[in-house]
Each structure stands twice: as C-alpha cells, then as structure tokens.
Image (tube, helix red, strand yellow):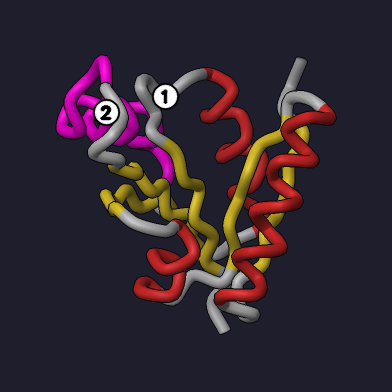
Amino acid sequence: MKKIAVFPGSFDPITLGHESIVRRCLPLFDEIVIGIGYNSNKHYFFSQDRREHFIRQTFADASNIRVERYSGLTVDFCKSIGANYILRGLRTSADYEFERAIAQVNRALHPGVDTVLVVGDP
C-alpha cells in the first residue's frame, strides 16, 4: 500500500515552518499532498490561487508532493484521495493537546487514517 500523507492548512501564506515539516517528512511517505483547506467563515489575506502558487513554487524541486484544494473535514478529504496519514506540526504543548483531540475524532470517523505529529524547528 502506498503511504500517502495529507499536510492540511490554510497556508496564508506558507511559512518556513510549514516547509521544514514537509521536507523533513518527505523520506517517510511515498507522497505528501499539501491540502489547501477552504473555510467560508474565514477571511484570507491571499487568494486560494496565490496560496497554491506560493506552495508550488516552494516545492518545485520535489517530485513526490502534490497540491490540492479541499473544503470540509480533512479526514474526509484523506479518504477521498486514498491518503492514510494526516501530517501535523507541533510548536507547543497546547498544540499537542489540540491535535490529539482532533486525531481521536478523526480515528473514530475513519479508523484507517492516522495522524503523525512532528515537532517544529525552534
């Protein structure tokens, strides 16, 4: 089975922290899908087109990265594209508690999708 991870976010804009997490995780997965989430209740600084453009520029050298847009639950997006991992970065212990709670709900909704937590660079 191909190991596909989704790295979800609004990426408004993509940061060096986002880039670091994705690049450090490239050897762990066959493919990383950077999922640009859309929430109609959220105000974005950059358009989805611009955010997608920035991400594609950032990872132009990586052949195993795909960029896709989605709305709705991340775990549903994972199932729709055959991804079995959600990749999330942690900056603080509060991030861990937040991500752990979401990961538990995601596993209840779709038991085949696991969350991988990666500690961000200082």
Left or right, residue 61 beside residue 45: right
Q: Residue at the far bottom: name it.
A: 1
Amino acid under disc 1: Ile
Q: Is residue 96 above or below residue 115?
A: above
Residue 58 in the image: state x and y as whole percent. 38, 28
Residue at 23% of width from left, 19% of height from top? 46
How far apart are the alpha carbons under marks 2 and 1?
A: 7 Å
Residue at 60% of width from left, 65% of height from top? 106
Element marked by disc 1: loop
Q: Is residue 46 above or below residue 33?
A: above
Q: Quadrant of residue 77?
A: bottom left
Tell me whether circle 2 and circle 1 mark residues in contact (CB < 8 Å). yes
Please rate how many residues cluster around mark 2, counting C-alpha atoms within 10 Å: few if below 14, some from 14 to 19, many from 20.
some
Nearer to me, 76 or 4: 76
Tell me the residue that label 2 is attached to: 51
Tell me the residue that label 1 is attached to: 14
Is residue 72 on the magenta stretch? no
Is residue 48 on the magenta stretch? yes
Q: Which residues are magenta?
A: 44-62
